[in-house]
Image (tube, rainbow, N blue to C red):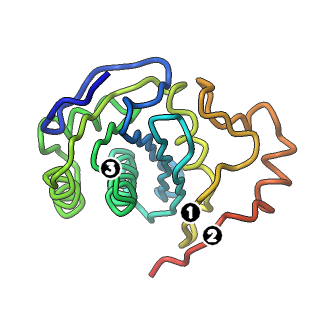
């Protein structure tokens, strides 16, 4: 399969995760908001065309709407991909509403500043495709998003995958099957880098 030039077009729902075409990178991102407090977080992961882990992130972002949390995940994923030198990129998100906003170039209830940041990233000189996927296929990004304390000011970078990770699994991060890993081993993961946000 060969990449074709795309102007950030949106493809519709895929139910299984699969590696990108040869020479490319795939970004999976997610965002969520706590209903009681309004605090939100985002997370994501970059994979190579071989399915190898390239980079993961998890970030607390303050008080935002659900869609804005999703868009923060998109923003962070695009920034990390660009800074890593990736220029052939597939972006996958599990929010149909968010993919629609990206497709329409603007959406109600979205911070103009945040949207404009994403729009500027999408206009850079790279080959980009945006896909809407099912939640199960996006589970790795979803689990990374849940790693931070949403009420705090913190962010994590993962240069290696957390324990129990399988890129080719439709589940991705298999913490749901291993509560011991989630509760005790993840905080000891040596390549996790904590960044205090300013």
Residue at (59, 59) in percent of width and height: 159
Q: Is residue 45 left or right of residue 67?
A: right
Q: Nearer the viewer, mark 2 or mark 3?
A: 2
Q: Position of residue 66 (x, y in %)?
A: 39, 46
Q: Residue at x 46, y 17 (%)?
A: 15
Do callouts 1 and 2 mark residues in contact (Cβ within 8 Å)? yes
Q: Considering only vertical position in the picture, is 142 above or below 61?
A: above
Q: Is residue 187 above or below residue 33?
A: below
Of labels 1 and 2, earlier in sequence is 1
When the figure is inspected, residue 66 is found, relative to residue 100, above or below; the finding is: below
Quadrant where the N terminus sits is top left
What x and y, as percent, mark residue 40? 47, 56
Residue 57, x across and y down, in percent: 52, 57
Residue 65 or residue 85, whichever sits in front: 85
Snapshot quadrant of residue 76:
bottom left
Tell me if residue 17 comes above or below residue 159 in the rendering: above
User: Does dot 2 land on a helix, a strand or a loop?
Assistant: strand
Few, some or many residues within 10 Å of mark 2 (<14, 14–19, 20+): few
Residue 157, numbered circle = 1
Q: Find disc 2 in the rendering and name its residue.
A: 193
User: Residue tagged by mark 3?
Assistant: 71
Write the residue at 54% across / 78% down: 196
Q: Residue furthest bottom?
A: 198
Closer to the N terminus: mark 2 or mark 3? 3
Give the CA distance from mark 3 to mark 1.
18 Å
What kind of element bears circle 3? Answer: helix
Q: Nearer the viewer, mark 3 or mark 1?
A: 1
State left or right for residue 95 relative to residue 41.
left
Q: Earlier in the sequence, mark 3 or mark 1?
A: 3
- Describe the element under mark 1 as helix, strand or loop: strand
């Amino acid at each position: 399969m060969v990449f074709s030039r795309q102007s950030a077009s949106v493809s519709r729902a895929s139910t299984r995760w699969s590696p990108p075409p040869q020479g490319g990178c795939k970004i999976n991102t997610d965002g969520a908001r706590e209903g009681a407090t309004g605090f939100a977080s985002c997370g994501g992961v970059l994979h190579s065309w071989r399915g190898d882990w390239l980079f993961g992130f998890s970030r607390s972002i303050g008080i935002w709407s659900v869609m804005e949390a999703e868009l923060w995940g998109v923003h962070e994923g695009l920034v990390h991909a660009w800074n890593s030198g990736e220029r052939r990129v597939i972006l996958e998100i599990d929010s149909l509403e968010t993919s629609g906003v990206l497709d329409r170039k603007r959406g109600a209830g979205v911070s103009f500043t945040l949207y404009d940041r994403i729009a500027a990233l999408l206009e850079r000189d790279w080959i980009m495709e945006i896909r809407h996927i099912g939640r199960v296929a996006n589970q790795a990004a979803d689990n990374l998003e849940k790693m931070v304390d949403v009420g705090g000011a913190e962010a994590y970078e993962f240069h290696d995958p957390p324990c129990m990770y399988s890129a080719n699994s439709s589940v991705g991060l298999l913490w749901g099957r291993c509560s011991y890993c989630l509760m005790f081993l993840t905080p000891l993961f040596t390549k996790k880098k904590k960044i205090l946000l300013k």
